[in-house]
Image (tube, grey):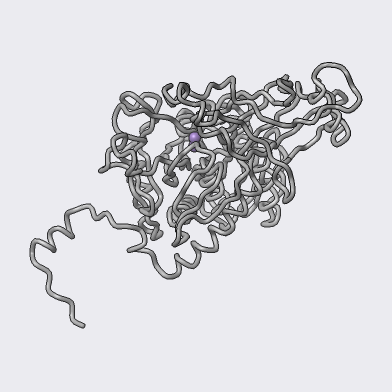
Amino acid sequence: MEEKEKSPAQLRREALCLDKKNGYDRLTAEDEQDMTAYCEDYKRFLDAAKTEREAVDEAVRLAKSKGFVPFIRGMSVNPGDKYYRVNRGKALMLAIIGEKSLADGVSIGAAHIDSPRLDLKPEPLYEDAELAFLKTHYYGGIRKYQWVTIPLELHGVIVKKDGSTVKVAIGAAPGDPVFTVDDLLPHLGAKQGQEPLNTAIKGENLNILVGSRPFKDDEGADRVKLAILDLLNQKYGLVEADFISAELEAVPAFRASDVGFDRTLIGAYGQDDRVCAFAALAALLDLDKPVHTAVCMLADKEEIGSEGVSGMKGAAFDTFMSDLCDGQRVALKACYEHSFCLSADVCAAFDPAFADVYDKRNAARVNYGMGFCKYTGARGKSGASDASAEVVGFVRRTLDQAGVIWQMSELGAVDAGGGGTVAVYMAERDIDTLDAGVPVLSMHAPFETTGKLDCYMTYKGMKAVYQAH
Ligand code: MN
Ligand code: MN
C-alpha cells in the first residue's frame, strides 16, 4: 500500500519536534526476544542477591564463569585481560582492559548494591509478654509503614568471639520460616490512624517477631528469649554476645515476579539499585575486547550517603584504578581526566496516582527506556553534579547509534523533594559523569516495580557506553 503523502505541517513537525513514543512502539523483534531472556536472568540475580554481600558473591560467580580473575597488585595489564577485586565482601570492581592505553581514559559503569532494609541492632534480642523480638535500626530511606506485616528474611554474617564467621540466610530456602513486624488491628487503630503517615509507625517499634515458645522446665525470667538463644546455639553455635559483632539484615521475603496480565513489569525487593547493578555487570560480562578499558563498579553504602570503606567516597576504587594504571605506567589522574562514568542508578517513574510531585513533561515514564538524569539533588540542584551539555550530548549520540531506547528524567517536581547518587563522587574525581538508569515505581518500598523494556534498555545502554570511543 502506498503511503499517504504527508502535509507540509506534518513534515515540519516530524523534523522539528521532540518525538516521545512508548518504547513498545519502537521495539524491534530482536530486542523483544533478548529482553525476555535478559529479564529472566535479572530475576534470578535478584533472588540470589538480597544483600550487598550476596550481590558481590553472585556477581563474582558470574564473572568467574566469563573468565575474570582476581586482580593482584603488580599483575600485567594487557588488552583483553579480565580482572575483578572484591572490597571487604561488600563492593566489587571489575575491568576488561581495552586496546587503548589507560591514559586515554576508561568507560565506567557505577551502580550500588545496597538497598533499604531493617538492620539488627547490636543487642537486638529481647522478650516482652512472652514473645521474643529483635530490635532494628532501619538502613536507608524507608517509609516505615510499608515494613510492617510483611514476611521478612534474615541475611548476613555473624563474627563469633573466636573470629570465625557464620553466614546466615533464613527465609530464603523453600520451607524456611520467615519473620515479621506486627501492626495494630484496625479495630483499635483509630488513634494511630490519625497520626501522619511518617510518624504513625515509629522506628523504635520496628521490632521483628522471632518466637513464642518458653524454655522447658525453667522458672526464670525471659524463657522465650532463652529458648531462642538455645536454638541459635544449637544451629550456629551462637551466644547472645555474638550479635554484637554481626551484620544481620531483615529483607522482604518476596521472590522477583512478573507483574501484570501482560507480564511487562517486574516486582521485587531491592531493584534500587540492583536493576542497574545487574545491567552494568551483565553488559560488561558480554563485552569482547573493548577499545577503552571498561570498568564496572558495584558500590555499597549509597543509601546512607556513600560513606565508609565500602562506599563510593572510600578509596578502594582509586586504589584499584591506580593499581591498573601502574600496570601501564600511567598516572591515575591522567586516566581519570579522560574517563567517562555512567552512574547507573534508578530514577522515579511517573506515577499517575501521585501526579503532583512530578513535572509530567520531564518525568521518566515506564516503558520509555533508560532514563538520563542530568541532575539530581534538592532545592536548586544542591548536592548534584549536574552533567554538562557536552556529556549529555555524548551519551545521547552513543545510545542513538546503538539503537537504545532512552528518555530524559528528573527526580521530581522542583522543590518536591530530592536525592542523590554516586555520580557526585565520581565527578569529584575529575571524571565526567551522567546519571542514567531504570525508572522505578514505589522506589525504596519492600516491593518495587520496573518495566522490563527499561531494564533491558539500561543493559543495552550500558553496553553502548562501555563500547564508546
Ligand atoms: Mn539508588
Ligand atoms: Mn535509593
Q: Could one spot residue 341 in this view of the protein?
A: no
Frontmost residue, 15 versus 156: 156
Figure quadrant of residue 5? bottom left
What residue is shown at x 31% (from left), y 34% (from top)? 357
Q: How many marks?
A: 0
What residue is shown at x 46% (from left), y 21% (from top)? 191
Image: 259 above or below 376: below
Coordinates of residue 326 in the picture (x, y in percent): 63, 37
Q: Could one spot residue 124 in this view of the protein?
A: yes
Image: 105 above or below 228: below
Q: Is residue 412 left or right of residue 128?
A: left
Name the outermost residue toward the front.
Answer: 187
Coordinates of residue 67 in the picture (x, y in percent): 69, 55
What residue is shown at x 51% (from left), y 46% (from top)? 276
Name the outermost residue toward the right.
Answer: 217
Which quadrant is the N terminus positioned in? bottom left
What residue is shown at x 50% (from left), y 65% (from top)? 34
Name the outermost residue toward the left.
Answer: 8
Frontmost residue, 292 versus 415: 415
Q: Is residue 301 left or right of residue 143?
A: right
Coordinates of residue 312 in the picture (x, y in percent): 55, 31
Q: Is residue 71 left or right of residue 312?
A: right
Frontmost residue, 23 versus 248: 248
